[in-house]
Amino acid sequence: MNRELFKYRTGLRVRSYEVDWQGIVHNTNYLRYFEVGRIEYLRHIGVTVDMKTIQGSGKVVVVRNEIDYETPAFYDDMLDIYTRVSLIKNTSFVMEGIMEKSGTGLAVSHNVAYFVWLDPESNRPKTIGDGFRKLVQEFEGDHCQIIWPSVDV
């Protein structure tokens, strides 16, 4: 992943209960950290993220979550989570993440997560609305591949 493509960063500190018996961050917590980055990214670009939206008009589910571990993080480490939307298709989109140790640029982990937008009543995939596409396009510019739905005339 090209770190220069990432415009959004959020920071967090590793807490004591997130480390395992080896003293390193337990592998499941890396996915939680990337989720923090994704939610804060969405808020930053203007997407409403609240329980009413999530349970109503904006049902979005993770269908695949890939993670590569580079170097361990430890208790009290400050981490930078860089997040971006890299692709929006008809009913799905892709978010990428890079985790680094703050101030060092040392890569801790990389993540690619795939999401599908669902109709809240049928739970079937539905076309992602133009509003979301526009918010991402305004923020990411040319660094996100956006496929706009075609309109038959």
Image: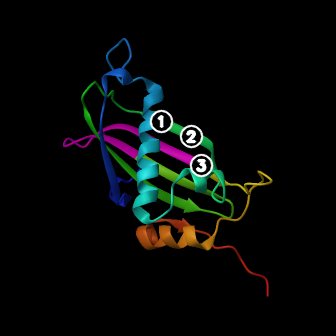
Could you tell me which residue is drawn at 51 percent across and 61 percent down? 48
Q: CA distance from mark 2 to mark 1?
A: 8 Å
Residue that mark 2 sits on = 65
What residue is shown at x 64% (from left), y 51% (from top)? 55
Answer whether residue 106 is magenta in the image: yes
Q: Residue at x 52, y 73 (%)?
A: 134
Q: Nearer the viewer, residue 91 or 5?
A: 91
**54 or 153: nearer the viewer:** 54
**In the foreground, 51 or 147:** 51
Q: Main secondary structure of the magenta part?
A: strand
Query: Magenta segment, which residues?
Result: 98-113
Callout 3: SS: strand
The residue where tag 1 is placed is: 31
Q: Dot 1, how many residues are within 10 Å of its Cα: few (below 14), some (14-19), or many (20+)?
A: some
Location of residue 133 in the rendering, given as x and y in whole percent from the top left corner: 56, 69
Amino acid type, callout 1: Leu
Residue drawn at point x = 35 percent, y = 57 percent: 8
| Whether label 3 touches label 2, CB < 8 Å | yes
Disc 1 versus disc 3: distance between alpha carbons? Answer: 13 Å
Q: Earlier in the sequence, mark 3 or mark 2?
A: 2
